[in-house]
């Protein structure tokens, strides 16, 4: 059946411009993911940020191959490297464009509760927990490795502007919050690097600390980063149902 027999409700689709920057960008992305190792890397980065060395260990690849594959993914605009705000010798890789990374990740089953952790429990972890309460399938809590006495006023104000609930006076230490069955997500580099023992982070989100800049714009940027990550993670989590 020829296309001429169809009546378009609006203008008929135009033939794609093979020199279009967007088309060429998409072609580079698909080509980069055509290698099994790079596709596996993208899969691992779908839900959290990972250090290059950890990628190599998890995939059984030597450091030279990891460096090569990461360079290809970076040049395709799929991955970018960030320097740790804690240990400046470390760097983390994050997926920039998840739309090219294939089907959704495998479900994370049996999660009793999600616990977001940052250093002071005064901004990022509080905003992440507030976002999760609105859309996540499990109970949620937040904590800090060195909690502040109160939530940062800019975080409280931002939450209120977005219709989210944060208790300004409620902060907690990880030792008083994290338990078995919790999915622990470090939303800052310092917390990720400080968490050891039973409270080790299951996922790491390298979200820049808005308190260091202390502007509304910095808090909005952190909020947008966290919101996108929550949206990607929430559909993959299956509740264990043990927390009240």
Image (tube, grey):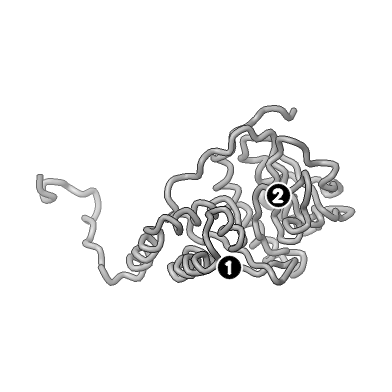
Residue 119 coordinates in the image, percent (x, y): 79, 57
- Label 1 sits on residue: 81
Residue drawn at the location 70% of the way across and 71% of the way down: 89
Residue drawn at the location 74% of the way across and 70% of the way down: 213
Which image quarter: residue 19? bottom left
Image position of 56 (left or right of 200): left
Front-lying residue, 147 or 1: 147
- Label 2 sits on residue: 201
Which image quarter: residue 87? bottom right
Quadrant where the image shows the C terminus: top right
Residue 13 coordinates in the image, percent (x, y): 23, 57
Image position of 211 (left or right of 108): right
Q: Are marks 1 and 2 in contact (CB under 8 Å)?
A: no
Residue 149 coordinates in the image, percent (x, y): 89, 53
Quadrant where the image shows the N terminus: top left
Label 1 sits on a secondary structure element that is strand
Residue 109 coordinates in the image, percent (x, y): 59, 34
Front-lying residue, 161 or 167: 167
């Amino acid at each position: 059946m020829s296309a001429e027999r169809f009546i378009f409700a609006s203008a008929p689709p135009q033939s794609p411009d093979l020199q279009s920057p967007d088309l060429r960008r998409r072609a580079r992305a698909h080509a980069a993911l055509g290698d099994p190792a790079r596709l596996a890397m993208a899969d691992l980065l779908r839900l959290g940020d990972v250090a290059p060395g950890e990628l190599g260990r998890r995939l059984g690849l030597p450091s030279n191959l990891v460096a090569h594959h990461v360079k290809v993914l970076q040049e395709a605009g799929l991955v970018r490297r960030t320097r740790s705000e804690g240990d400046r010798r470390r760097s983390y890789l994050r997926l920039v464009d998840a739309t090219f990374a294939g089907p959704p990740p495998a479900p994370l089953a049996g999660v009793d509760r999600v616990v977001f952790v940052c250093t002071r429990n005064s901004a990022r972890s509080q905003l992440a927990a507030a976002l999760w309460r609105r859309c996540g399938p499990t109970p949620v809590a937040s904590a800090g490795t060195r909690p502040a006495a109160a939530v940062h006023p800019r975080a409280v104000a931002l939450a209120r502007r977005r219709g989210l609930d944060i208790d300004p006076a409620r902060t907690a230490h990880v030792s008083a919050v994290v338990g078995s069955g919790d999915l622990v997500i470090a939303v800052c580099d310092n917390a990720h690097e400080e968490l050891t023992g039973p409270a080790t982070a299951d996922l790491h989100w390298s979200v820049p600390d808005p308190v260091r800049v202390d502007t509304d714009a910095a808090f909005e940027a952190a909020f947008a980063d966290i919101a996108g990550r929550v949206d990607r993670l929430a559909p993959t989590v299956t509740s264990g149902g043990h927390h009240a």
